[in-house]
Amino acid sequence: MRAVENALRRHAETDRPLVRVLDGRGGVAAAHGYREITRAARALADGIGAGAGRIGVLCGNTPEFVVADLALLALRATEVPVPLAFSREQAAGLLEEADVCLVDAQGAARLAEWGPVLPEGCRVVEVSLAALAGGTAPYAVPDGDEDWICKIIHTSGTTSRPKGVRIRAHGVGALIDSLHGAMPAEAFTGYLSFVPFSLLIEQVTGLYLVLLDGGCLTLLPPGTPLVGTSGGAVEAALPQLAAARPTALVATPALANALLDAARRASDAGLDVAPALFGTERAPLICCGGAPVHPETLRALDAFGIAVYEGYGLSENSSVVSWNTPGARRVGTVGRPLPHVRVRLDEEGELLVSSSSLFDGYTREDPSSCAVVDGWLHTGDLARVDEDGYLTITGRRKNVIITSAGRNVAPEWVEAQYARLPFVRAVAVVGNDLPALHGLFVIDPAADRTEAERALAAFGAEHLSEVERVETVHLMGADDEAYRRLFTVTGRPMRKAVVEHLLTHRSR
């Protein structure tokens, strides 16, 4: 993290904007400079005091999250970001050893909804940029370069209580240095945040890479749902692109698919696509991960001048393992490993990762935990590595479906095919020990369900083999509250929860 801290030393007392908040009408509701944010972080750190070990952060994508993150960096504390979309039980599991819990207005409201989730003696500190704006002491970080557990990041397990991934400061620092060197110079001077800051990748790209480039982070208008927190969030977020005029953003596969639909509409209307969508002559750097985007979708976006760069990562490596970049891109792959990362395959095709950014273990173990053996992280992902280093993820070892007919199906590949349909927002395919595949399709609320079923059947018959084709269709509207329980923020299905849902809901 030394590079980030050095950047803060350079920029902390400048008046250049660090955080902007859009107003939802094409303008900016508020802008906060480096001096304002960093002095507020110093005031918050002084108020918390040294010695607080594990600190929960219950904030939305607000300036207050940035203040809290920088305050905890200065304190050398362990930050535990908690998704606001968590259930009460999930939040309690992540916060069970917290000494302090920092909340903004959204977090305070969520805490009240949950009721008692904090351990006895945990102090709640409200973070308000307005209240902290009077701070006059400059931001300061310790001079030493010691390592510590700087974050505990949630990851799903086999129970409703998420386990925490213990992230080392030196590990995330190595990741940031490597990723920053691989990306174009000054690409992150104008970043637009679409997904929750509780995700480590969004902290890395939306805050730390922005700081390294001396850039500005733009936030969606208050009340706008973040992508991944509801099925309809993509449509709500898309109009903000032109207002933000971003130089970079991290997209989910659902957002990539929606960008293609929007590009086609703009082109059909006779508009120049990039200015219509992004408010700029060229598309920003768009990075995507979490689940695969179909190569034909990427190629279609390319034709409109919109390149989407897929990558691969996991919290156990402090986020990114590999990424396509403007200088090294191969559609259908997740790029080459970052410079500080080595990869290899075991005899069964499982991807193993070795790097200086590996995690320091979990807060609790369960059968889904990844093991580190002789310095190599066993990811559980099946992969292929080309001779020139490009990495392709072909599935997840534990997710391979074995039908009652003994046929093996990789659900991720099947899901990527169906996601190409314009009305599909997310897909989960299951079928272990069943004669054929079942598919849960999250669809646009405006879509006609009968027409959707016909389109799904026709698409499967044309593009998929009999084994890969979904035979039993379950439909869910993108506005259904169950969405958050069944899919991660990046659109990846939580398969156990999906199976349980399909067993108890016979939705068609």
Image: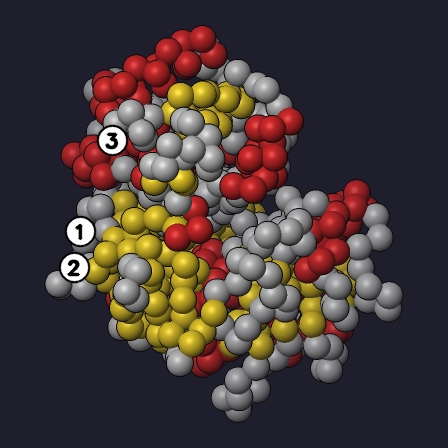
Horizontal and vertical percent for residue 434? 46, 30
- Which residue position holds label 3? 273
Q: What is the number of the mark on residue 115?
A: none
Q: Quadrant of residue 481?
A: top right
| Residue 184 visible to an observer of this rendering | no
Horizontal and vertical percent for residue 202? 47, 56
The amino acid type, in three-letter code, at marker 3 is Val
The amino acid type, in three-letter code, at marker 2 is Asp
Proximity of marks 1 and 2: CB atoms separated by less than 8 Å: yes
Colour pattern of the rendering = secondary structure
Farthest residue toward the front?
Answer: 405
The amino acid type, in three-letter code, at marker 1 is Arg
Farthest residue toward the bottom?
Answer: 144
Which residue does the image show at 50% across and 60% down from the upper left?
200
| Left or right: 371 as drawn, with respect to 131 | left
How far apart are the two marked residues, 1 and 2, measured between alpha carbons? 11 Å
| Residue 454 visible to an observer of this rendering | yes
How far apart are the two marked residues, 1 and 3, measured between alpha carbons? 23 Å
Element carrying mark 3: helix
Circle 1 residues within 10 Å: few <14, some 14–19, many ≥20: some
Horizontal and vertical percent for residue 291? 38, 45
